[in-house]
Image (cartoon, helix red, strand yellow):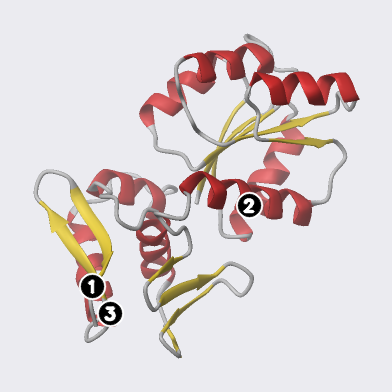
């Protein structure tokens, strides 16, 4: 799951990036409200963690602009402004959840997962595709009754595809999610990963299809 973090407290942001990465999230960080829209245009995110007291552009303005533009990205407000009025106004503006500082990391992760699951809806299961299930607690994939043994890159690629089951992901989107910390990665690396994953999923009701010009899509087929 790829998250955009908009937070101007550098120490907090650095800690959150590390902690959420360890929890299986992939986090990009901006420290100015004006950079949120630019980041959302450049990258496909699963959720936005938004501080209200951002420089450049206030979090309320950022949220209002997103919703006015019809952007349905799940937004979790993370702020020190813990008051009933602040909570109510943020939710009325279109925030999906509100968490006051200080907070527990476990609660933040749980709220993010819940927001993302709700955003996907029942028609596009977020963590399951037929017999393939991702257990967010154990960070493991189960196919039928068997646990899949995957390399870290295979794990990241399959998680990205599963999170968007039924929807195509381009090679670049998969590259961004799997090789986010590396530069100049050849797009052919995605083809290698998909080839390996197809072998892992062979003889099951789950397959990775290629959609010409669009990318790859994880699909459930009839047994």
The reply to whether discs 3 and 2 touch (Cβ–Cβ < 8 Å) is: no
Determine whether, in the image, residue 56 is placed left or right of residue 210. Answer: right
Which residue matches tag 1?
221
Q: Residues within 10 Å of mark 3 (few under 14, many from 20)?
A: some
Number of marks: 3
- Above-or-below relation of 106 to 154: above
| Residue on which the image places disc 3 | 201
The single residue placed furthest to the right in the displayed view is 83
Report x, y in % for residue 58.
Answer: 68, 12
Instruction: Decide which of 122, 106 is in the foreground and name it.
Output: 122
82 on left or right of 57: right
User: Closer to the N terminus: mark 1 or mark 2?
Assistant: 2
Task: Tell me where residue 104 appears, x and y as whole percent.
Answer: 83, 50
Residue 160 position in % (x across, y down): 39, 56
Residue drawn at the location 51% of the way across and 44% of the way down: 119
Instruction: Point out the residue furthest to the bottom here.
Output: 145
Mark 2: few/some/many CA within 10 Å (<14, 14-19, 20+): few
The x, y position of residue 53, in whole percent, is 75, 17
Q: Relative to 221, is 18 above or below? A: above
Q: CA distance from mark 1 to mark 2?
A: 27 Å
> Closer to the camera: disc 1 or disc 2?
1
Q: Quadrant of residue 138?
A: bottom right
Crowd tier of the residue under label 1, counting other residues whose Cα lies within 10 Å: few below 14, some 14–19, many 20 or above: few
Residue depicted at 55% across the width and 39% down the height: 47
Q: Which residue is mark 2?
A: 114
Q: Above or below — where is 213 with respect to 39?
A: below
Element carrying mark 3: loop
């Amino acid at each position: 799951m790829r998250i955009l973090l908009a937070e101007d407290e550098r120490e907090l942001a650095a800690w959150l990036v590390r902690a959420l990465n360890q929890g299986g999230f992939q986090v990009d960080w901006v420290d100015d409200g004006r950079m949120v829209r630019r980041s959302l245009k450049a990258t496909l995110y699963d959720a936005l963690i938004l501080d209200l007291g951002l420089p450049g552009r206030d979090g309320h303005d950022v949220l209002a602009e997103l919703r006015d533009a019809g952007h349905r990205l799940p937004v979790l407000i993370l702020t020190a402004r813990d008051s009933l009025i602040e909570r109510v106004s943020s939710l009325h503006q279109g925030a999906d959840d509100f968490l006051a500082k200080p907070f527990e990391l476990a609660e933040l992760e749980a709220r993010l997962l819940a927001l993302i699951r709700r955003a996907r809806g029942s028609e596009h299961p977020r963590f399951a595709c037929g017999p393939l299930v991702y257990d967010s607690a154990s960070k493991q994939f189960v196919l039928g009754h068997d646990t899949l043994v995957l390399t870290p890159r295979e794990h990241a690629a399959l998680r990205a595809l599963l999170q968007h089951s039924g929807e195509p992901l381009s090679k670049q989107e998969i590259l961004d999610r799997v090789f986010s910390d590396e530069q100049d990665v050849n797009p052919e690396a995605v083809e290698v990963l998909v080839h390996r994953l197809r072998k892992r999923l062979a003889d099951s009701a789950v397959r990775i299809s290629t959609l010409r010009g669009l990318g790859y899509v994880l699909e459930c087929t009839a047994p």
